[in-house]
Image (cartoon, rainbow, N blue to C red):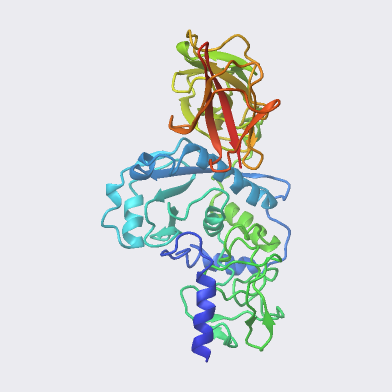
């Protein structure tokens, strides 16, 4: 019976894994100076050795393997910006902030072939020198783990992450940086151990005292912090709405409790992990002061630029002749190392159909790749080494046309489409009162394929003609209206 219960429990926990299904979550078992952390914990609670109001700014240096860099969109510059933005949001409670030491460095993927141990990886990483920053290596596979800290000859060489597990707005990088700054897992001592959690926990497990639910041994057992709940769960698990584990655990005294899924140093699945405890924060700041005194900076605010990028052209509601190309231009944003132009058929930019990466040396970009007769919306992102969350311009709209004989350009504001964007449930309403019959209606998708084609010999209906779009996926389309006198094209946006 117990074996069956254990099997069902493991099946429940593993069924909630959404990424890294074949990978261990974290291979960092102990902090590099675990003895120092243990000694520091005996002094808790104490005032923060570094003034709590002083923000610690840590530089981070990313290294990305060439294979991942070549795979479009896998580890994009924008994804890195979003990750650091989220990382800073998670560490805001600790008054710790991160910035880029420099642009990401691309390293050879072939150099990782044949590397099978953390020792070999540590030797390899010795060859990648960086300035005074936290090194983060994103590789295809981090030795069958989602991530870990590389401890080589007693020195922390940096953080290695598997691309399979790396995602924006996740807690993986925050978790590994927590290890880098001295924090153990909340379930310290249970790493890699299979246990039937329906049973009462023993007093000791792998030579580590097991923490009791009443907190009576919190300073000498488990992770050593008294403001983190006991935790024995060393598998990925999905927390409840109250951030608690889906099952109750039993401590050595026979008392039931639930693990806290909100703690970043545990193994709850995203988006549950979102905080550090006060004692964990004190430890990270003191650890940084002890071992990385030259790593953090106190003069970064002067470099942080929260100003939104200012765009110039295309102007709002302008009409652009594709014969000359669409010229995007903007004002210089100090500190930018790359600009990204995003183009969408939707006012809320929910669907990005074109993205262009521009070097910091340029303040304009011309493309002829957009489609005639469509309304577009665009914005500009500024990728900055020091500012990550507020680097997007306002959204502007423009329409594309071609000055040809069979294209109606008499009124740029005129459209026979009465509702645009269009909900899939409401259908497309057309006003054909001013059109001459017979005529054709042709609807093309974004790839230029015809998905609707119908001939009308005479006007049917009182004022409007309704066409169902429920069978068409959300996105941007082109409606062409053609009769003997003219051909006109209109941009159509179908919303979810």
Question: Most extreme residue toward the front, as rendered?
Answer: 458
Q: Residue 123: x percent and y percent?
A: 32, 55
Q: Image quarter for residue 43?
A: bottom right
Tell me: 161 left or right of 67: right
Query: Which quadrant is the C terminus positioned in?
Result: top right
Rendered position, 76 above or below 116: above
Q: Residue 76: x percent and y percent?
A: 46, 39
Question: Most extreme residue toward the bottom, as rendered?
Answer: 1
Q: In this orientation, which residue lies closer to the viewer: 256 or 403?
A: 403
Q: Residue at x 54, y 36 (%)?
A: 475
Q: Is residue 420 visible?
A: no
Q: Is residue 249 visible?
A: yes
Q: Residue 221: x percent and y percent?
A: 61, 77
Rendered position, 101 above or below 205: above
Q: In this orientation, which residue lies closer to the viewer: 214 or 285?
A: 214
Q: Residue 313: x percent and y percent?
A: 58, 16
Rendered position, 56 above or below 355: below
Q: Residue at x 67, y 80 (%)?
A: 217
Q: Residue at x 65, y 47 (%)?
A: 89
Q: Residue at x 35, y 39 (%)?
A: 70
Query: What is the number of callouts on the image?
Result: 0
Q: In this orientation, which residue lies closer to the viewer: 478 or 345?
A: 478
Tell me: 242 left or right of 442: right
């Amino acid at each position: 019976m117990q074996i069956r219960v254990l099997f069902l429990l493991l099946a429940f926990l593993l069924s909630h894994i959404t990424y890294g299904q074949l990978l261990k979550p974290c291979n960092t078992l102990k902090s590099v100076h675990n003895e120092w952390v243990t000694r520091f914990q005996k002094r808790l609670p104490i005032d923060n050795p570094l003034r709590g109001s002083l923000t610690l700014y840590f530089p981070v240096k990313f290294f990305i393997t060439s294979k991942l860099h070549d795979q479009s969109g896998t580890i994009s510059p924008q994804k890195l910006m979003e990750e650091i933005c989220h990382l800073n949001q998670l560490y805001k409670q600790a008054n710790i902030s991160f910035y880029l030491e420099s642009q990401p460095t691309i390293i050879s993927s072939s150099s990782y072939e044949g590397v099978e141990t953390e020792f070999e990886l540590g030797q390899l990483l010795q060859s990648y020198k960086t300035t005074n920053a936290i090194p983060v290596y994103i590789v295809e596979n981090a030795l069958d783990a989602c991530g870990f800290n590389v401890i080589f000859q007693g020195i922390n060489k940096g953080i290695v992450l598997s691309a399979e597990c790396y995602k924006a707005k996740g807690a993986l990088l925050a978790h590994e940086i927590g290890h880098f700054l001295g924090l153990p897992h909340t379930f310290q001592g249970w790493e890699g151990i299979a246990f039937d959690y329906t049973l009462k926990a023993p007093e000791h497990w792998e030579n580590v005292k097991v923490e009791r639910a009443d907190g009576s041994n919190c300073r000498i057992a488990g992770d050593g912090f008294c403001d983190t709940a006991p935790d024995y769960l060393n598998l990925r698990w999905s927390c409840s709405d109250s951030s608690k584990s889906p099952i109750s655990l039993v401590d050595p005294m026979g008392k039931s409790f639930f693990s806290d899924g909100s703690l970043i140093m545990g193994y709850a699945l995203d988006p549950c992990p979102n905080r550090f405890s006060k004692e964990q924060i004190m430890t990270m700041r003191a650890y940084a002061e002890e071992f990385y005194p030259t790593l953090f900076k106190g003069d970064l605010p002067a470099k942080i630029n929260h100003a939104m990028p200012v765009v110039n052209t295309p102007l709002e509601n302008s009409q652009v002749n594709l014969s000359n190309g669409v010229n995007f231009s903007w004002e210089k944003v100090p500190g930018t190392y790359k600009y990204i132009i995003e183009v969408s058929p939707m006012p809320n930019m929910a669907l990005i159909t074109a993205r262009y990466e521009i070097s910091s040396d340029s303040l304009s970009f011309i493309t002829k790749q957009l489609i005639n007769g469509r309304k577009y919306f665009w914005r500009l992102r500024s990728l900055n080494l020091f500012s990550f969350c507020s680097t997007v311009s306002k959204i502007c709209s423009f329409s594309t046309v071609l000055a040809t004989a069979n294209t109606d350009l008499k009124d740029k504001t005129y459209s026979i489409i009465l509702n645009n964007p269009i909900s899939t449930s409401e259908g497309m309403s057309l006003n054909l009162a001013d059109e001459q019959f017979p005529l054709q209606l042709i609807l093309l998708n974004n790839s230029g394929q015809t998905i609707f084609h119908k001939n009308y010999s005479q006007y049917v209906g009182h004022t409007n003609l309704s066409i169902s779009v429920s069978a068409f996926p959300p996105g941007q389309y082109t409606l062409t209206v053609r009769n003997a006198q003219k051909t006109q094209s209109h941009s159509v946006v179908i919303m979810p």
